[in-house]
Every structure is written in C-alpha cells, then in structure tokens.
Image: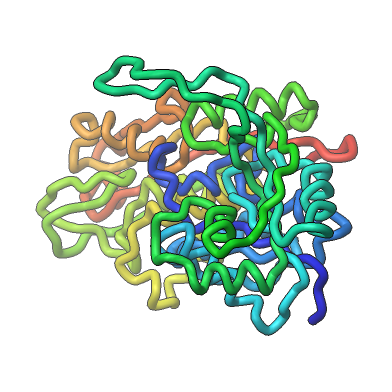
Amino acid sequence: MAAGCIGIVVAAGRGHRLGGEIPKQYRPLGGRPLLRHCLDALCAHPKVDAVRVVLHPDDWALYEAAAEGLDLLPPVAGGATRQESVRRGLESLSGIEPARVLIHDAARPFLEPAIIDRILAALDDRPGAIAALPVVDTLKRGADGASAGTVERCNLWRAQTPQGFHYGEIMAAHQSAPAEGLTDDAAVAEAAGLAVALVMGAEENFKVTTEEDLARAERLLTTRGHAGEWETRTGLGFDVHRFGPGDHVWLCGVRIDHDRGLIGHSDADVGLHALTDAILGAVGAGDIGHHFPPSDPQWRDAASDRFLAHAVALAAARGARVASLDVTLICERPRIGPHRARMVARIAEITGIAEDRVSVKATTTEGLGFTGRGEGIAAQAAASVRLPLRDGGAGP
C-alpha cells in the first residue's frame, strides 16, 4: 500500500481527570464518542489516505462501536505512556512507509480541515509542523500559592495536535528518544534536531480534559449547528437469573452479601443486563446475547459493567445520547432499599450520565411466581435515548 499521508489517532489513555467508567475518548459528545469526531474529520480530508487508531488493549469493544462503518487501518495496542503509544503506532506503519504522518489526540474533537491543510503545506519546507496558538495572557510563575514573578510571553505558543512529520524522520526520532519525559511529538523531533514549524491552530481545537471541557464542547456543538434536530426513542429490557450456591449477589453494579448467589455465565447482574438490553433495543442493535454470547468462554464470570459500557458506546457510535435509565428489580430478598443510592451512583458512573437521570426501583410479587417463591430475581428496564434526525428522516 502506497500512501502519501496517514493519520495516527492516539487513544490509549485512561482519561482519569475526566472520570467516569468509560475512558474519555469514548464519552459521548453530541451523541457520538469523542474519538468518532476525530476519525470523521481525518477520514473526510482528501489529503489523508488512511487512518489508524492506537488504543488501550482493554478498549477493543468500545473502539469497534466508535469506529463502526469507517474504513480504517486495523488498530494497534498502545503503551504505558503517550510517547510509547505513538512510537508503536509509527512502527506499525513500517510496511507502508507513508511520506507523511499526522499524529492527533483523540480528545480534540474539533479538528478543522484548514488546520490539516496548513500543517501539510508547512511540511513542504520542514520535516515537522504542529498546530499551535500564541500565548496572549500574562503568565505568572507561582511559589507557595503566591505570584513569584512574571514570565515573558513573547514567542510562547500553546501546542495542539495534529502534529505532522515526514514519516522516516519522526520514526527515527522516536526510536532514539529518551524512554520517557517528552510530552508531545514536537519535543521528540526537537530532541533529534529536527526543525518544527508552527502553524496557526484554533481555539475550538481544545483538548477535552475535564467535565467543564466536555460541557463546553456540547455547547460549541449546539452553537455551530452540529446538533441538529433530535428524536427520542425508548428501549425495554428484561432479564432473569435463578439462585444457586453462593454468599453474595451483584445487582446494578453493587455487591450485596446474601445467603445465596445468582447463577449465570457472567456475574449474573440482572439489573445491568436489563439496562444493557434496553439501550441496545432503543438503537436497534440486537440484544446482550448477540454481543456477548454465553457460549463464548471469554465472558465467563465477566463483570456486567463491561456489557453496559459497551451498549452506551455502541449507542453513541450510532449517534445516540442516553437521556435516562429506569430499572425495576423484582425479588423478595435481598432488600434493595439500603443499596439503592449506591446502585444509582454506579449506573451513572458506568454510563456517564447524571445520577438524576437514573432510577432504581424494587418490588415484590406478593409471594407469587418464581420470584415470590425465592427461586430467583428478575429485572425490567427502560432506556430513553436521543438520536439526531438525518436528512429529515427518523434517525439512522
């Protein structure tokens, strides 16, 4: 495969500062994962021949949902640091040897074509070029919580991505770079003596790091008109597991001590299973058994939060935003009331939505049926999701 330019999207981080059960690059923005916005921008650019994602080994299912429908190079696993992840991404292109590479952070969703154009144009004269913005604020050096002096801001720039390079030179620079301590690829290039051009970035090309950043991104989408019109869909889920030997049960992501356990291929969390099916149903994506077949040994004793997180990411990849979740647990025992608040918090954490959009209820069948006889636990759930209308139709 001959390629003039390949985009590498670095998506192997954990995003701890943003929080949530799902790594930040898979958190929904305008109904789509952050990562999907970057991929769409790179794939749509006429001078980018192919795109490859460098991801965390635990995120394959999330990646597949986010990248659904895109013609991408197979992803590669990243390393413990961003620097190592980029190096692995570059090494994976050794059989292709593109003339140029663009390296972009998955947490920068607002990549405009003009920025790519400026970087590629600068690479006609330099081995490297990065998007950046000049510092306009007065800078202070701090010590013990007080200002200890003013830093001259002349010739200071805030680095962004993409960062573009001639492939052979940045590959050699990464292979000879110190093992750690370099925070971007321009630093790697500079350490190897490569000249790196500065081209104008954009204020909108910011990195989503905190919840405030994510809220800012949502507002920006709305003001730019990207959000469009929305429709609301509802999906229903139902699950049952019978009791067996054990000393605890998992319900809605919370471990509860009990004189028996629930039998299942995974951890038998009926609450999370019902919620997973409800979300999948709302976006027409089948059921939990289709995505996580009980015949597959890799899901034996698996934590059900993985199933729910996958459903959220899959929904986001199809343009859906989870608006609210409601689950009812049906059993005589254990008592749900003492654990309700923790269940709500855990579901909100897994799905990345606010706690006031999650409802956990419980009821009994007044001694009737298999739940009344204490033979098992059932759960029913409803999920409301919002999807963007496309071409005036009724969603994807």
Q: Is residue 190 left or right of residue 327?
A: right
Q: Residue at x 82, y 69 (%)?
A: 4
Judge from the rendering whether residue 188 lies leftward or rightward of residue 319; answer left or right.
Answer: left
> Residue 227 location, x and y as percent?
74, 30
Q: Residue at x 71, y 52 (%)?
A: 129
Which of the pair 230/126 is nearer the observer?
Answer: 126
**Residue 348: x %, y % from top left:** 41, 35
Identity of the residue furthest to the top in this view: 146
Residue 106 lies, in percent from the top left, at 59, 50
Number of dots carrying numbers: 0
Q: Is residue 208 left or right of residue 45?
A: left
Which of 381/145 is in front?
A: 145
Q: Residue furthest bottom?
A: 95
Taking the spot 72% from the left edge, 66% from the top edge, the residue there is 166
Check the picture and name the quadrant holding the N terminus. Answer: bottom right
- Residue nearest the viewer, comparing 33 with 118: 118
Residue 193's spot in the image, x, y percent?
59, 62
Q: Nearer the viewer, residue 326 or 380?
A: 326
Please tell me in which quadrant of the rendered image residue 337 appears: top left
Residue 37 seen in render: no
Vertical arrangement, residue 11 with respect to residue 223, above or below? below
Q: Is residue 118 above or below residue 241?
A: above
Q: Quadrant of residue 147?
A: top left
Q: Is residue 5 left or right of residue 210?
A: right
* Colouring scheme, one of rainbow, by chain, secondary structure, one colour: rainbow
What residue is drawn where x is 19% and y is 42%?
333
